[in-house]
Amino acid sequence: MIKILLADDHDMVRAGLRRIVEESGDMVVVAEAADGPAAIRQALAQPPDVAVLDLSMPGMDGIEVIGHLQCHYPRLPILILTMHDEEQFVVRALEAGAMGYITKRSAADELLKAIRKLVAGGRYLSNSAAEALAMRVGKGAPGGSLLDSLSNRELQVLRGLSLGQTSREIAEAYGISVKTVNTHRDRLLKKLNLRNNIELARFAIHNRLVDL
């Protein structure tokens, strides 16, 4: 049986994924997590054969979790399962060490196919993720996009502010100080040449960084 770690902050999503996995006949969910730190703890307590991670989780996002898991289990196949199919997220996840990337719009059989492909030592990208990656390659060397200039933490702060979260809420979600959040906000305004949180939200919506 293929042992799976599921990490997603939505209980109903995890329940649905668990049902899909356990009805496959050759897979079993050995651990679940609702946030990044819990995903790491669960992986250390009971090493899975594949980790299925969402990108948007409290405490640590999927990109940070990938980095931690890679330190402990360099050969652990990691599959990103997320709502985001924008090239920015696809590229960052693959650069961090993910071996697969599919969206939550994918059919159940695609999830199972992706897991089996990763266990066999391959890689798997959904059609939308592959298209996003192709767009990045077609553009040549990165550097021209405003999004490329943002760090992972700046993206987290940008998404939080765009969703109406306060600096304190963002700080608590990612285990950083309010001062650090405000510093990142100031950097975002400067890098993106924007004036306030409203314009930050508009930028995030335009670039599909938040789900409305």
Image (spheres, grey):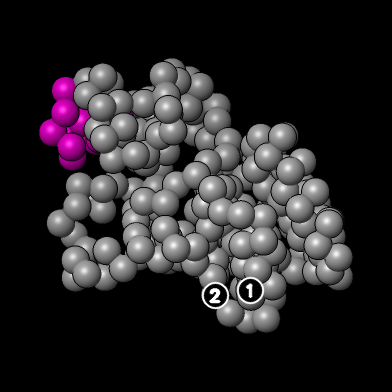
Tell me the residue that label 2 is attached to. 123
Q: Amino acid at mark 2?
A: Arg
Residue 92 to residue 154: above or below: below
Taking the image as shown, residue 63 lies to the left or right of residue 196, namely right
Residue pushed farthest bottom? 121
Q: Quadrant of the C terminus?
A: top left
Q: Which residues are magenta?
A: 184-195
Magenta span contains residue 28: no
The quadrant in which residue 136 appears is bottom left
**Badge 1: how crowded within 10 Å, few (<14), some, or many (20+)?**
many
Tell me the residue that label 1 is attached to. 118
Q: Whole-percent x and y of residue 30?
A: 84, 56
The answer to whether one can see residue 189 in this image is: yes
Taking the image as shown, residue 7 lies to the left or right of residue 170, namely right
**Badge 2: how crowded within 10 Å, few (<14), some, or many (20+)?**
some
Magenta span contains residue 194: yes
- Disc 1 and disc 2 in contact, CB within 8 angstroms: yes
